[in-house]
Image (cartoon, rainbow, N blue to C red):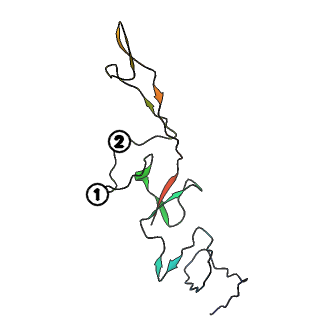
Amino acid sequence: GLVRLDASAALSAPGSGSAVYSITTSSSVNVTGTGAKVREAGSDLVPKGAIILWVNSNACPPGYTEYTALRGRLPVGLPAGGTLAGTVGTALTDLQTMTHTHTGGAGGGTIRTAAGNNLTNAADTTMPYLQLLFCQKS
């Protein structure tokens, strides 16, 4: 059926199931519900494979799965000719802090005594960070 709404009306659509809605408007349209999909010209506005940062729960929203390759890792832009989804080093553990020390033979970070080079105290080099869930569009 055809529905005509004025500026103060609202259309309640089911949050699940299969339905097609076509709206022509010169103002904004609000879509609520985690299962809602927004499409334009027959295509999802969020393409398959897109990654979102998620903080509402420890599980991704419907239509998304966790992108586990980013667990404990910092995303970095792909350089020209680089390896897509390539990783370097060991992933961080839960709320891990990082420290930095120099070995006895290093020129800086040591003190020289009659007995030889000695290590200085280790320093906390952790950058402030926030742990989020990375979710990929299914």
Pointer 2 or 1: first along the chain: 1
Q: Is residue 4 left or right of residue 69?
A: right
* Mark 2 touches mark 1? (CB < 8 Å): no
Question: In the rendered view of the protein, which quadrant contains the C terminus?
Answer: bottom left
Q: Measured along the vertical axis of the image, is residue 107 above or below residue 114?
A: below
Q: CA distance from mark 2 to mark 1?
A: 20 Å
User: What residue does disc 2 label?
Assistant: 89
Look at 52% across and 47% down and name the residue there: 131
Q: Measured along the vertical axis of the image, is residue 15 above or below residue 9?
A: above
Q: Amino acid at mark 1?
A: Ala
Q: Measured along the vertical axis of the image, is residue 106 above or below residue 23?
A: above
User: What residue does disc 1 label?
Assistant: 80
- Residue closer to the observer: 136 or 41: 41
Q: Secondary structure at mark 1?
A: loop
Question: In the rendered view of the protein, which quadrant contains the N terminus?
Answer: bottom right
Q: Secondary structure at mark 2?
A: loop
